[in-house]
Amino acid sequence: MTDLDMRTPGALADAERWTAHNYHPLPVVIADAEGAWVTDVDGRRYLDFLAGYSALNFGHRHPGLIAAAHAQLDRLTLTSRAFVHDRFAEFCHRLADLCGKELVLPMNTGAEAVETGIKVARKWGYQVKGVPDGQAEIIVAADNFHGRTTTIISFSTDPDARNDFGPYTPGFRIVPYGDSDALAAAITPNTVAVLLEPIQGEAGVLVPPAGYLAGVRQLCTDNNVLFIADEIQSGLGRTGKTFAIEHEGVVPDLYLLGKALGGGIVPVSAVAADRDVLGVLKPGEHGSTFGGNPLACAVGTEVVKLLETGEFQQRSAELGARLHEGLHALVGNGVLAVRGRGLWAGVDIDPALMTGRQAVERLAAHGVLAKDTHGSTIRLAPPLVVTPADLDHALAQLAAIL
Ligand SMILES: *Cc1c(COP(=O)(O)O)cnc(C)c1O
């Protein structure tokens, strides 16, 4: 095929011409997909090792999820929360049970779940803990990623995410990730919550030191502070368990969920917590036009049903062991270090060889789509439906580009 027969260059130029340049995508124009594989507009196939930043944990167009969406499209798609619809309670009930919590508050995007967690924690602080009005503090970790709203980027330490978007929302204290002494020192009588990713995804799939999350749990309990776990990327099977925080046997006060909760079909996010926390919200105090809509609930219910089987968590644990074994074999051969859990890995490429961006460009040329993060780190997060053969294929391509 010559360049003239190809649709990719024109499609890339059009996207460049008509859109804000707030992303720097790989030069691949995807047209359709199934499972762990995508096909571009010129018919080339790629293994998807990003999986929509874990929004596609169940793969592209999982048949059960697509069937649930189709059935709901033919019946009812939107009511707003001014009325109740017949898919609402089942979704919230099943998700609450999956989380072991009493209540669920559905939203749409991950950032909205984070915003909801912040608002709930502040209100709980004033109404239950007795923090003086306007004084609530939330402790967060350096190098966090919790989304892109003005409040959330106010406590980001990434200059790209934050610079020139001020004035910033006050009320956040930033401590180093993985250091419970620093966290203990930051707690004051006005601290209402600690907000953390159990594994920091955007930062390079950073797994905290053993005992850290349990230590944070203890500090929160001792100081009457809420522990908010942002499991938007780490949760719902990605690490080999339903929630990444389970690896340390820790139960947070609030779970923030998103990404895979929408089955790769619609944006669905949620906050799950007990009544003594989520119960602080009264009618009119928080909401969303699309939050908990019938289509979202139909897909979300099917997602929870898939997770109830435990099959995806088990796949992630087993195939994750295979992935990490394969990646560790590359350490010393162009790879400096590998981190992660389950089907989730941060791979530090030797910067003397190439940047992370160059690595993912070369991987794409070899038919594997992944994403770099800061510097020379790339992250791998295939759909949990990936086969062992696909996994081995991707590992071979990574070895080939090094
Ligand atoms: C993606 C992500 C978010 C934000 O989700 P959006 O749907 O993009 O708003 C928040 N927290 C974590 C850990 C994420 O990975």
Image (tube, rainbow, N blue to C red):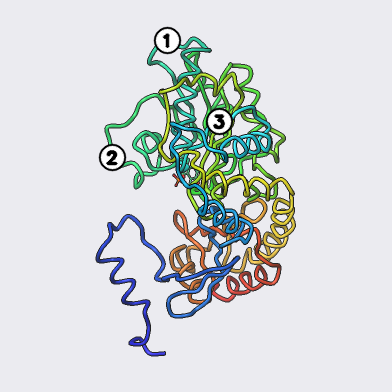
Q: Name the residue under label 3.
A: 228
Residue 143, visible in the rendered structure: no
Q: Which amino acid does label 1 sit on?
A: Pro
Which circle, 3 or 2, is nearer the viewer? 3
> Which of the two labelled residues, at mark 3 and mark 2, occupies the earlier sequence position?
2
> Camera-side residue: 323 or 126?
126
Q: Name the residue under label 1.
A: 132
**Sooner in the amino-acid sequence: mark 3 or mark 1:** 1
Which quarter shows the C terminus? Answer: bottom right
Is tag 2's residue or tag 1's residue first in the polypeptide sequence?
Answer: 1
Q: Give the residue number, with chain letter if any, for mark 2.
A: 165
Q: In this view, does 23 lie to the left or right of 244?
A: left
Rounded to the nearest angstrom, the CA distance separating label 2 from label 1 is 28 Å
Gap between marks 3 and 1 measured at Cα: 21 Å
Q: Where is the N terminus found, in terms of image quarters?
A: bottom left
Q: Position of residue 364 (x, y in %)?
A: 49, 72
Q: What residue type is labelled 2?
A: Phe
Amino acid on which disc 3 is placed: Ile
